[in-house]
Image (cartoon, helix red, strand yellow):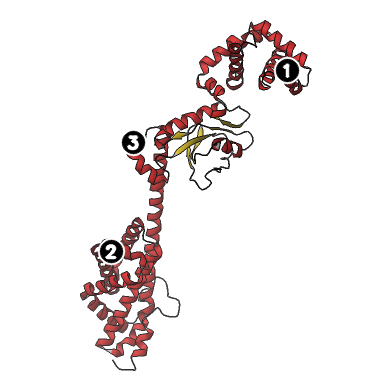
Amino acid sequence: MPQVVRPRIGALTGPPPTAPLPHRFRSLADREAVEVLHRAARVLVASLPALTDRLVEALYAQEPGYRAAIESDRAEVWQEVHHSLRHNVGSLIQPREFRESAHRTSRWIGEIRAEQGVPLDAVLHAFRMGGAMVWQDLVDETARRDPEDVRLLVHVAADVWNFVDEHCGIVADAYRQAERRLTWRRENRQRLMVAALLDGTARIADLADAAVMLGLPEQGRYAVLAVATGSAARPALTLPAAPEAVVLWHPGQDAEFAILPLAGAPGELSELAAALDVPPGARAGIGSAVEGLAALGDARRLAETALRACPASGGTVLLDEHLPDALVVSSPALAGALADRVLGPLDRLDPADRDVIVETLTAWLDADGSAQRAGARLYCHRNTVLNRLRRFEQLTGRCLTRPRDAVEVSLALAARRLLGT
């Protein structure tokens, strides 16, 4: 090749220095330049297999994102590259006939690579490498046939690189759309799996896959948190013993549930309940710990029981620390019957008088049977407390020093407080 031609060829081996004109393919090309481009492109079409081999080798050597795909199925990548080159080089010769098929091919490649997890930057780099290789071959072929015609290719350089940029945009758009679909499918599968685990309907055979999908150990230790859906926002949640653990939330009909991976540390749930930042007026319940993903259905039911044991005014109830209340809310009908039997005689009193006796009973039980501490809490003398307790015993026939009666009174008070019976 004459030396005078080499600098021109070097200037044509990359994109022009000026910004390309969008969507104006061949807009600057005169008839002679187009004919030169067509002649060189036809030669490329005839040698596409060799061009495909070179591009696949270049991708393997220069683009790490494609290396694994080529090692896994080189023939599949070769066919993809060949298909793309055939339509894109054909578009240089017959843009109207090949435009739509070239677009379809680029969209298909973007979708396939997104599904395979090849990074978008790697896919775009591959397209630009292909565009650069095609352009260099066009220049080399023109220089081989007639070196003087190389100068004409400058008129179509911007259009060729616009074409490459256009297809990079198509690939990127298809890739992102496919990525969004894949993300939605993955998140939907996760939601369905979490729902099945919390409902207790997950199959034992699916637990290993569920563990991988959710990033949770199949045989780990778990508890479930239930938060009433009337809350303004989910409470801030950090697991004291496992701050890096993944916490999965799932919306239910009357509550939102969080799966809490536990580290097995002593007092872990008590620490969590104390640290839980529940908004004022919100209600939350934490169930007892269970072993394994298969028991999450039981954990959810325990969390719902804890939530029902939470007072209407709000707060957090740890089931293990409120088991008597849990017994009450677990059988509302029986709890209501017990409350009517034990506290029913008080209903014949004036409401204000009845409320004073109930308040005194509650304070006395909370003070572990100490009239002195109950009086301090109620701002009255201990003898006043004892007089009210004796009156209760006279009205109901109960004896507060008898353990069985004391238990029934405590449960009856819990039923009135939690169930409003």
Q: Point out residue 328 in the picture as x, y percentages from the top left corner.
A: 54, 20
Q: Earlier in the sequence, mark 3 or mark 1?
A: 3
Callout count? 3
Query: For the N terminus, which image quadrant?
Result: bottom left
Where 70 falls versus 11 (above or below)? above
- Give the residue furthest to the left: 46
For the point 69% across and 18% down, the residue is: 364
For label 2, the crowd category at 10 Å Cα-Cα, with few meaning under 14, some 14 to 19 and many 20 or more, is: few
Q: Secondary structure at mark 2?
A: helix
Q: Point out residue 260 in the picture as x, y percentages from the top left corner.
A: 49, 39
Which amino acid type is shown beneath numbered disc 3?
Ile
The residue labelled by disc 1 is 371
Q: Residue 84's quadrant in the figure?
A: bottom left
Where 154 falls versus 364 (above or below)? below
Query: For the C terminus, which image quadrant?
Result: top right
Q: Point out residue 296 in the picture as x, y percentages from the top left corner.
A: 43, 34
